Amino acid sequence: MIPFNKPFQSGKEINYLQQVLAVNKLSGNGVFTEQVQAYFEQHYHLKKVFLTTSCTDALEMAALLIEASAEDEIIMPSYTFVSTALAFDRQGAKVVFADVEENFPSLSVASVRQKISPRTKAIVVVHYAGVPVDMKGIMQLAQEHNLYVIEDCAHAIGVKQNNAYLGSIGHLSAFSFHETKNISSGEGGILGINDSKFIKRAEMIWEKGTNRAAFFRGETSAYNWSDTGSSFMPAEFIAAVLLAQLPEINKVNQKRLDLWNYYYQKLEVLQKADIIKLPQLPDDTPHNAHIFYLLCSSASERQELITFLKKRKIHSVFHYLGLHNSPYYLKNNPLQSLPNTEHFANCLVRLPMYYDLDEKEQQLVIDAVFEFYGV
């Protein structure tokens, strides 16, 4: 079986894990955590970084920091993983879904504009497949309406837009290191802070609502329960695996881009014959090849393709179903139409994409797609 994904390993992970065990500091916020946070701050120009157990946790910290509540509306794409919405829903805020662009599942600035109301507090953008949302347009909207912007960068490590790294543009950002991501520590995430006013409180939320960090710095005589919070801090093992991979980001992204471009080049024949559609990116759009997808003409055709590829020992998968149509959301919200989201939800299929995918395996995938379509 050619898997859909195979987590990247740099070869240094075992050594770093052994160092954690040798030092015998296993809980969070040790030397490895500090190095990971410093790496992100220095390389991606974030004012402050907190390593978390997951991207979900980073988004939950963001929801706490902007004090999302039942009085607020948070605009985001429906075409995203549930964590993007769940973090704000848990705080009681009303999640408002906007549509994506017609040619690519990036949050549409025009759709966001239509969704803004007097209750809107924040816009959450998702850089799907590592392709930047129009951040200039989003930040202009945010400035006009005095809104926070939170970047969900789960797919988007190492990508720039207009010389600024994704994650460093909005007020807050969240990254993922789940095993499906370009680099991975199994689980794990990052909260990035670009607005200094959030830093002090974020530290307490990260430390289970206490001023423990300030106490250990000698800034207070005792540490107390000072705010809300949770156990967002991961063990040093997560940080150690991540630190082993961080210096390899550019190498990993470039290899994936090579694979992405090869898929596109070979499958473009089918697009020109109007059999499938491939990702439509504006010229010179930077991305990190997190995902390669093609669009079938219907949901039934997609399922037939996935089944066909499985019989050829190739694992392909569809993606998000659209949160605006989910049973949980529809319990308290009316059915709405987001036609572009629904198109991608019905027709998009992702092909195997990982650092160790070799030329022979990739060609088998391409040949199987051609065989399915009888070309």
Image (tube, rainbow, N blue to C red):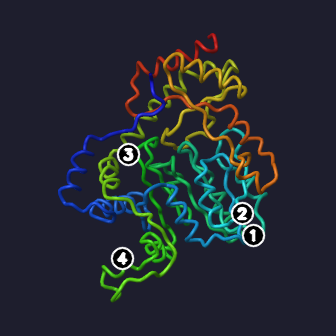
Task: Please report contact status of discs 1 and 3: CB closer than 8 Å, yes or no.
Answer: no
Quadrant for the N terminus, please.
top left
Task: Please report contact status of discs 2 and 1: CB closer than 8 Å, yes or no.
Answer: yes
Q: Residue at x 44, y 35 (%)?
A: 256
Residues packed near mark 3 inside 10 Å, few (<14), some (14 to 19) or many (20 plus): some
* Alpha carbon distance from label 2 to label 4: 33 Å
Residues packed near mark 4 inside 10 Å, few (<14), some (14 to 19) or many (20 plus): some
Q: Going from the N terminus, do you reach mark 2 or mark 3 first?
A: 2
The residue type indicated by label 2 comes to: Lys
Q: SS of the residue at dot 1? A: loop
Q: Residue at x 46, y 29 (%)?
A: 259
Instruction: Identify the mark at residue 94; answer none if there is no mark.
Output: 2
Q: Quadrant of residue 258?
A: top left
Q: Going from the N terminus, do you reach mark 4 or mark 1 first?
A: 1
Q: Going from the N terminus, do you reach mark 1 or mark 3 first?
A: 1
Q: Residue at x 60, y 21 (%)?
A: 307
* Residue 220 percent location from the top left of the image: 35, 87
* Residue 36 percent location from the top left of the image: 34, 58
